[in-house]
Image (cartoon, rainbow, N blue to C red):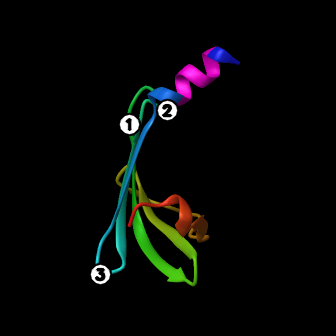
Amino acid sequence: MDAGLAQIKKMVVTLELKPNKTYVADAKNLPGKKAPEYNEGTWKQEGNTLWLTSTKSNGKPTTDKKPQKFLKAFLHV
């Protein structure tokens, strides 16, 4: 368990919400991944819920355009 926690502590995730309702995100030091992950798409807010819909992952169009739910309480916006 300590080894897994140590890996999680190394992770760095950055999410930039742009005024034009698009976002870019990158994740570094993910367990099992040698290279950083890069994602971009659109976002919308409904009440205290933030929805992200990916349009590209690592520069390639995504096939699953299902919105992902995030709670605003966990974001620094």
**Residue that badge 1 annotates:** 36
Characterize the magenta stretch by its predominant secondary structure: helix
How many residues crowd around disc 1 within 10 Å: few (fewer than 14), some, or many (20 or more)? few
Q: Is residue 7 magenta?
A: yes
Pointer 2 or 1: first along the chain: 2
Q: Position of residue 67 (x, y in %)?
A: 59, 71
Tell me where residue 15 sits by quadrant. bottom left
What span is in magenta? 3-8
In the displayed structure image, the side of residue 21 where residue 46 appears, left or right: right
> SS at mark 2?
loop
Quarter of the rendering occupied by the N terminus: top right
From this view, report whether residue 6 is shown above or below residue 55: above
| Front position in the image: 41 or 13 | 13
Tell me where residue 71 sits by quadrant. bottom right
**Residue that badge 2 annotates:** 30
Q: Residue at x 55, y 73 (%)?
A: 51
Query: What amino acid type should be assigned to the residue bearing mark 1?
Result: Pro
Cβ–Cβ under 8 Å for marks 3 and 2: no
Query: What amino acid type should be assigned to the residue bearing mark 2?
Result: Leu
Pointer 3 or 2: first along the chain: 3
Label 3 and label 2: CA atoms lie apart by: 28 Å
> SS at mark 1?
loop
Name the disc covering residue 71, or none: none
Tell me where residue 55 sits by quadrant. bottom left
Q: Position of residue 20 (x, y in %)?
A: 29, 81
In the displayed structure image, the side of residue 55 where residue 63 appears, left or right: right
**Residue that badge 3 annotates:** 20
Q: Is residue 69 magenta?
A: no
Label 1 and label 3: CA atoms lie apart by: 25 Å
